[in-house]
């Protein structure tokens, strides 16, 4: 049997995603939340785990470098990879929101400047609202942008709300709820159907 490769994102959901696999009886002896190892095998040596940067994960699955991936709906909507989205894992739950200073208006003279990791999601949301914007693409520490005058507001994920609070910012508008999804490479879903379905089945049983 060929190896089944599963990609998990490094960062905050990795631990939860690894625990979904563990509950399904798929254990990676070398995995722990602080590991710097990027590729590891499960106990049966039939499943390979790779740890990749969150924003890159859709590419690994779309190109077939990984057969399966676990990734946030926010990243899927932003990257729109050509993959199958097979299940909601009900972990990594958070909101995508517009945030800024208390009492701040989204109506400004000229375009509203928005710092975000999510320019695609942001542009589509504000286009629908008929609000003219200019996005500034950043890769992290988004909350810093309005504090130092780089943007009027931000669009980012909010999970506990701690980062906003500690920086004197609040949610001005909730855009959508997101959670971690299971995505599968389209061609591999045909060639490795049995292995992929067995993994999905194990996960479902673990939830029951
Ligand atoms: C994410 C996001 C927010 C924060 C929200 O950043 O971009 O900054 O988490 O979480 P909270 O509501 O629980 O505070 P992440 O931790 O992924 O780091 P980053 O700034 O490097 O993107």
Image (cartoon, helix red, strand yellow):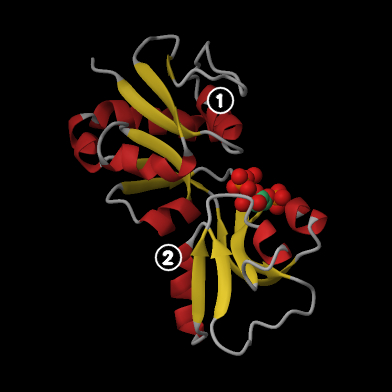
Instruction: Determine whether the beta carbon of the residue marked 2 sits less than 8 angstroms from the nearest atom of ligand 1.
Output: no
Q: Judge whether 151 appears above or below 81 on screen.
A: below
Judging depth in this view, the residue of 23 and 59 nearest the camera is 59
Q: In this view, does 65 lie to the left or right of 134?
A: left
Q: Judge whether 12 appears above or below 94 on screen.
A: above
Report how many numbered discs are placed on residues in the image. Answer: 2
Q: Earlier in the sequence, mark 1 or mark 2?
A: 1
Please tell me which residue is depicted at 58% across the width and 38% down the height of the picture. 13
Please tell me which residue is depicted at 81% across the width and 54% down the height of the picture. 166
Question: For numbered disc 1, what is the local secondary structure?
Answer: helix
Mark 2 crowdedness (10 Å alpha carbons): few <14, some 14-19, many ≥20: some
Cα distance, mark 1 to mark 2?
35 Å
Work out whether residue 182 can be spotted: no
Judging depth in this view, the residue of 131 and 13 nearest the camera is 131
Question: x, y (%) of residue 79?
Answer: 38, 54
Q: Judge whether 91 appears above or below 175 on screen.
A: above
Q: Residue 186 carries which label?
A: none
Instruction: Write down the residue under mark 1.
Output: 23
Question: x, y (%) of residue 100?
Answer: 71, 70
> Residue 127 appears in which quarter of the rendering?
bottom left
Question: For numbered disc 2, what is the local secondary structure?
Answer: helix
Q: Which of marks 1 and 2 is in front?
A: 2
Q: Is residue 146 left or right of residue 55?
A: right
Q: Residue 120 carries which label?
A: 2
Assess whether mark 2 and mark 1 are in contact (beta carbons under 8 angstroms). no
């Amino acid at each position: 049997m060929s190896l089944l490769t599963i990609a998990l994102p490094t960062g905050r959901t990795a631990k939860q995603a690894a625990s979904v696999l563990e509950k399904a009886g798929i254990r990676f002896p070398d995995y722990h939340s602080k590991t710097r190892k990027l590729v590891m095998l499960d106990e049966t040596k039939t499943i390979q785990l790779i740890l990749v940067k969150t924003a890159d994960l859709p590419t690994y699955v779309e190109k077939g470098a990984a057969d399966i991936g676990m990734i946030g709906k926010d990243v899927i909507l932003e990257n729109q990879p050509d993959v199958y989205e097979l299940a909601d894992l009900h972990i990594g739950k958070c909101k995508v929101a517009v945030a800024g200073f208390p009492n701040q208006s989204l109506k400004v003279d000229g375009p509203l400047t928005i710092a975000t990791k999510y320019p695609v999601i942001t542009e589509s949301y504000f286009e629908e609202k008929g609000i003219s914007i200019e996005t500034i693409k950043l890769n992290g520490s988004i909350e810093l942008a309005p504090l130092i005058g780089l943007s009027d507001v931000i669009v980012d994920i909010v999970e506990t709300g701690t980062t906003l609070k500690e920086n004197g910012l609040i949610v001005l508008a909730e855009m959508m709820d997101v959670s971690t999804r299971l995505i599968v490479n389209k061609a591999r879903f045909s060639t490795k159907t049995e292995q992929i379905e067995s993994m999905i089945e194990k996960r479902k049983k673990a939830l029951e």
